[in-house]
Amino acid sequence: MKKSTLIIVIAGILVICVAALASVAWQKTFDSLYKPNPGSVIAKAKCDLCHVKSKPRTELNAYGKLLKGKKVDAASLRAIESIDADKDKSSNIAEIKAGTLPGDPKSKPKK
């Protein structure tokens, strides 16, 4: 393998690893702040909390897009609580409290 090809492959792997670590950090911060009910849709979502359900999970959903580029901390999560990311007439915090996904318009609190 040529040296330039090897460098490109290694760089690609590093980008994927950094993205995966960021996702884990967001998940831990989210779980620590909101403590979702273990049986809820939001607790089971894992990556789907911020990512579109696809393989690989590289595309962000509406909620994930609001967090993109922000510092991974509770303040960033709180800053977007009042927004309705997925435009389903429920704020992000209302969905989080109900255990539904704030980035998926099909997942909304029962009224």
Image (cartoon, rainbow, N blue to C red):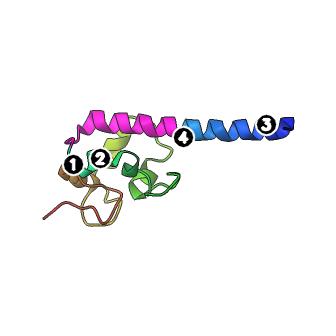
Residue 16 vs residue 9: left or right? left
- The first of marks 3 and 2 along the sequence is 3
Check whether the beta carbons of the residues at disc 1 and disc 2 lie within 8 A of each other: yes
- Part of the protein shown in magenta: 20-38
Q: What is the number of the mark on residue 6?
A: 3
Q: Which residue is located at x 28 percent, y 66 percent?
A: 88
| Residue 74 visible in the current orientation | no
| Quarter of the image with the C terminus in it | bottom left
Secondary structure found at label 4: helix
Residue 102, compared with residue 27, is above or below; it is: below
In which quadrant of the rendered image does the N terminus lie?
top right
Sequence order check, earlier mark of 2 and 4: 4
The amino acid pointed to by label 4 is Ala
Q: Do the residues labelled 1 and 3 touch (CB within 8 Å)?
A: no
Calculate the distance from the C-alpha at mark 1 to the C-alpha at mark 3. 44 Å
Which of the two marks, 1 or 4, is nearer to us in this view?
1
- The quadrant holding residue 106 is bottom left
Real-space CA distance between mark 3 and mark 4, rounded to the nearest whole angstrom: 20 Å
Badge 4 is on which residue? 19
Q: What element carries label 2?
A: helix
Q: What is the three-letter code of the residue carrying label 2? A: Lys
Q: In this view, does 35 lie to the left or right of 55?
A: left
- Looking at the image, the residue that sits furthest to the left is 111
Q: Residue at x 30, y 55 (%)?
A: 101
Circle 2 residue: 44
Give the image location of residue 87, x and y in percent: 33, 66
Cα distance, mark 1 to mark 4?
A: 25 Å
